[in-house]
Image (cartoon, rainbow, N blue to C red):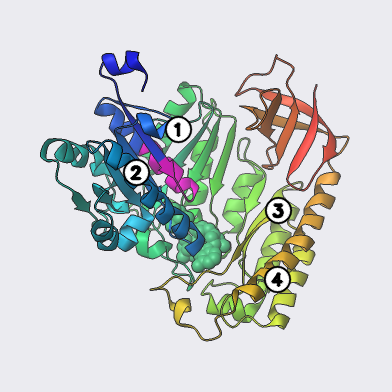
């Protein structure tokens, strides 16, 4: 520990976050609450006296990693029994007592509906030194707002709704995040205006299914209305949103994006599978024909838009023929990029009970075939950008190299270039693309 800091009594916390953007944003809210208790963030876990593991349980692979991490923490507790270690978020919501009983070195298990209680729970542990299990089964309609300490200075996540009502048959999220709860339009707009005044340039509206925004509100507002309102906020350069459910994406939203200034030309539309029988058993609520029409509408209305997707390989009962249909489907759509997952059996979900669970080898084989096809398509699409100039929002130095800068196009493609020294995080710059790869574009600052 740094002696100066120890001497002035500064307390530190450290968060380890798994899972989706919603979880990353939740961690920023955990950080905001810990700051009100006098803790500052530290990148070094050894320096922290409060350590929070914010967990995900969407796939078994994530859970395995997290349980490994929880085990590792025992070492730190042995060195300093006074530290507070917490397991929070989706896996804590699901496995609550199991974690609490099995890991006596964990002081706090806090579920997704209790996030706003962190201050009071930490205070309770600090004073009583008792372990605390705080997992509500259900959410209050909307949890009270808590302070946020954001990692980025230019790009901010803004949740517009919590929870999910869709119950796709493979998915655990509705069970651990509860029913859909929308924030009011006024509170979202107010938060974004403030972010604009604070210098943020890019906003990502977050929800498990943003297209059903507002359905639970008394006021008569929908996602398109929200987009229109946010598009008026002049201090913000770019607006993104995720995730869209194809079933609920509609003409009004597409037209709003078409007529907007700030909403980026990127559509992330998770299709999950390219076969109607599988889609039906997934309870996705659309057909491949409907989805293709949606893609055609988007491409007609917003030329140059990028379209990306999520796909699950090896859903129970998926035949070789059905898999080949999905391959044909992605060749037909020609996605800019696809995020591909091996089906993971989640106990408590309907699909976990379905017959025809496939062996890992089959799932992996299909995933690899799918990725080969998609990678080729992504590269072909990106190659069309070679020798063109794209507008990039500068994020900063790339992860591995201080001299290489990184940013994104409006279509959400990652661009790398050699640092010139004039570009700053948050600037909009023009980059000449020299070389396109599957996942990145490389170019020069103009
Ligand atoms: N609400 C969002 C994100 C859900 S989780 C949406 O509906 O798109 C992100 C992705 O994880 C999903 O799109 C899906 O492709 C994948 N996923 C969810 N459950 C899964 C499971 N049991 N096995 C494998 N992938 C899964
Ligand atoms: Fe899961 Fe489906 Fe809800 Fe997405 S829409 S979180 S995949 S249940
Ligand atoms: Fe996100 Fe994982 Fe929870 S994907 S909502 S952190 S289960």
Q: Position of residue 387 (x, y in %)?
A: 88, 35
- Whether residue 213 appears in this view of the structure is no
- For the magenta stretch, what is the residue range? 16-29
Magenta-colored segment: predominant secondary structure: helix
**Comparing marks 1 and 2, which lies closer to the viewer?**
2
Q: Is mark 3 within 8 Å of ligand 1?
A: no
Residue 97, position as x, y percentages in the image: 24, 61
Q: Are marks 1 and 3 in contact (CB under 8 Å)?
A: no
SS state under label 4: helix
Q: Is residue 267 magenta?
A: no
Label 3 belongs to which residue? 337
On screen, residue 281 versus residue 109, left or right, reads right
Q: Earlier in the sequence, mark 2 or mark 4?
A: 2
CB atoms of marks 1 and 2 within 8 Å: no
Please state which of residues 27 and 65 is positioned toward the viewer in this rendering.
65
Which of label 1 and label 4 is nearer to you?
4
Q: Nearer the viewer, mark 2 or mark 4?
A: 2
Q: Which mark is residue 365?
A: 4
Residue denoted by label 2: 75
Say if 102 sits above or below 344 in the image: above
Q: Position of residue 14 (x, y in %)?
A: 38, 35
Report, in whole angstroms, how far the alpha carbon at label 1 lies from the one at label 4: 44 Å
For mark 1, what is the residue? Answer: 192
Q: Is residue 20 magenta?
A: yes
Residue found at x 71% / y 49%: 306
Q: Picture coordinates of residue 200 (x, y %)?
A: 51, 26
Q: CA distance from mark 4 to mark 3?
A: 19 Å
* Label 4 close to label 3 by CB (< 8 Å): no
Residue 23 position (above or below residue 157): below
Choose the circle earlier in sequence order: 1 or 3: 1
- Going from N to C along the chain, the mark reached first, 1 or 2, is 2
């Amino acid at each position: 520990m740094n002696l100066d800091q120890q001497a002035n009594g500064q307390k530190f916390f450290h968060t380890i976050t798994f899972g989706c953007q919603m979880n990353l944003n939740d961690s920023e809210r955990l950080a905001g609450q810990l700051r009100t208790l006098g803790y500052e963030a530290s990148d070094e876990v050894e320096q922290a006296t409060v350590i929070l593991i914010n967990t995900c349980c969407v796939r078994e692979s994530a859970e395995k990693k997290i349980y490994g991490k929880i085990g590792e923490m025992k070492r730190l507790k042995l060195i300093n029994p006074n530290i507070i270690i917490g397991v929070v978020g989706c896996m804590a919501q699901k496995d609550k007592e199991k974690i609490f009983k099995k890991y006596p070195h964990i002081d706090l298990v806090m579920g997704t509906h209790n996030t706003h209680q962190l201050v009071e729970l930490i205070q309770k542990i600090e004073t009583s030194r008792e372990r605390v299990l705080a997992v509500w089964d259900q959410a209050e309609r909307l949890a009270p707002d808590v302070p946020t300490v954001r990692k980025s200075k230019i790009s901010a996540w803004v949740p517009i709704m919590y929870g999910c009502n869709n119950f796709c048959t493979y998915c655990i999220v509705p069970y651990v995040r509860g029913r859909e709860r929308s924030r009011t339009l006024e509170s979202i707009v107010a938060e974004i205006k403030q972010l604009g005044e604070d210098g943020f340039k890019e906003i990502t509206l977050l929800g498990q299914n943003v297209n059903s925004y507002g359905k639970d509100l008394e006021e008569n507002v929908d996602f398109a209305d929200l987009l229109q309102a946010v598009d008026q906020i002049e201090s913000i350069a770019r607006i993104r949103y995720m995730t869209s459910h194809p079933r609920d994406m509609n003409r009004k939203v597409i037209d709003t994006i078409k007529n907007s200034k700030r909403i980026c030309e990127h559509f992330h539309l998770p299709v999950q599978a390219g076969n109607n029988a599988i889609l039906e058993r997934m309870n996705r609520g659309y057909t491949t024909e409907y989805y293709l029409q949606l893609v055609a509408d988007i491409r007609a209305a917003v030329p140059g838009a990028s379209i990306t997707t999520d796909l699950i390989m090896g859903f129970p009962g998926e035949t070789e023929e059905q898999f080949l249909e999905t391959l044909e489907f992605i060749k037909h759509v020609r996605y800019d990029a696809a995020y591909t997952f091996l089906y993971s059996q989640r106990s408590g979900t309907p699909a976990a009970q379905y017959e025809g669970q496939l062996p890992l080898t089959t799932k992996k084989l299909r995933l690899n075939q799918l990725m080969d096809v998609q990678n080729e398509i992504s590269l072909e699409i990106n190659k069309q950008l070679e020798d063109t100039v794209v507008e990039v929002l500068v994020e900063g130095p790339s992860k591995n190299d201080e001299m290489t800068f990184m940013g994104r196009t409006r279509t959400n493609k990652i661009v790398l270039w050699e640092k010139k020294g004039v570009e700053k995080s948050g600037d909009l710059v023009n980059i000449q693309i020299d070389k396109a790869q599957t996942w990145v574009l490389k170019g020069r600052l103009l």
